[in-house]
Image: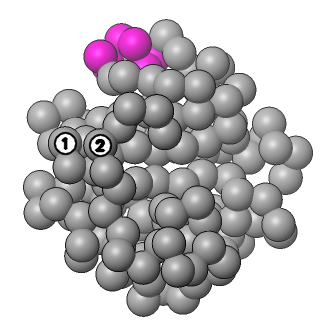
Amino acid sequence: MGNLDMIWCPLAKRHAFSMTRDIHDAYIAAAPEQFRAMLRQLRAQLSRVFPDAKEVMKYGMPGIQIEQTIIAGYAAFSKQCGLYVDPSAISDHANEIASLKLKATKTGVAFSAINPITDELVEKLVVSSRIHKGI
């Protein structure tokens, strides 16, 4: 995660395995208030795009998994949120990420209430991530 601010998840360090829906709810509730609506929307969108996915808590962040493969994860920090996908998905959509003035790392895109990620870009990234993971 590089130099991003501290992650907000009081339960994540104790639970690095699959979790129930309640853990995702708790994660979002513990996030800074200005990010909660965005995280709820992102979570709902991931569920709509991948109804066959299982919600999990891995690497200290909530995400979705199909079979035994993590397709996408998301996280809240003190000043921004992140969506984490396969590195190839980031490179596939690098121009669109840049055009929206979002900051990208090798595996993620940072966004905030001031500069949110679009639903269209989220869908492109997670679908691309699934394709690159061969699922």
Cβ atoms at labels 1 and 2 below 8 Å apart: yes
Amino acid identity at mark 1: Lys
- The reply, left or right, for residue 84 in relation to residue 74 is right
- The reply, left or right, for residue 23 in relation to residue 50 is left
Given the current orientation, which residue lies at the most extreme right position?
Answer: 134
Q: Quadrant of residue 17?
A: bottom right
Q: Is residue 117 visible?
A: no
66 vs 87: above or below? below
Mark 1, residue position: 79
Circle 1 sits in a helix, a strand or a loop, which is it?
A: loop
Inter-mark Cα distance, 1 to 2: 7 Å
- The reply, left or right, for residue 113 in relation to residue 28 is left
Main SS of residues in magenta: helix
Residue 124 within the segment the image draws in magenta: no
- The reply, left or right, for residue 118 in relation to residue 78 is right
Where does residue 74 sit, x and y in percent of width and height? 46, 54
Amino acid identity at mark 2: Asp
Where does residue 134 sit, x and y in percent of width and height? 88, 45
Total number of numbered discs in the rendering = 2
Q: Which residues are magenta?
A: 96-101
The crowding category of the residue bearing disc 2, from other C-alpha atoms within 10 Å (few below 14, some 14 to 19, many at least 20), is: few
Q: Is residue 67 visible?
A: yes
Residue 99 within the segment the image draws in magenta: yes
Depth check: give the residue in front, 49 or 28: 28
For image coordinates 20% across by 31% down, the residue present is: 115
Mark 2, residue position: 5
Circle 2 sits in a helix, a strand or a loop, which is it?
A: loop
Depth check: give the residue in front, 95 or 8: 8
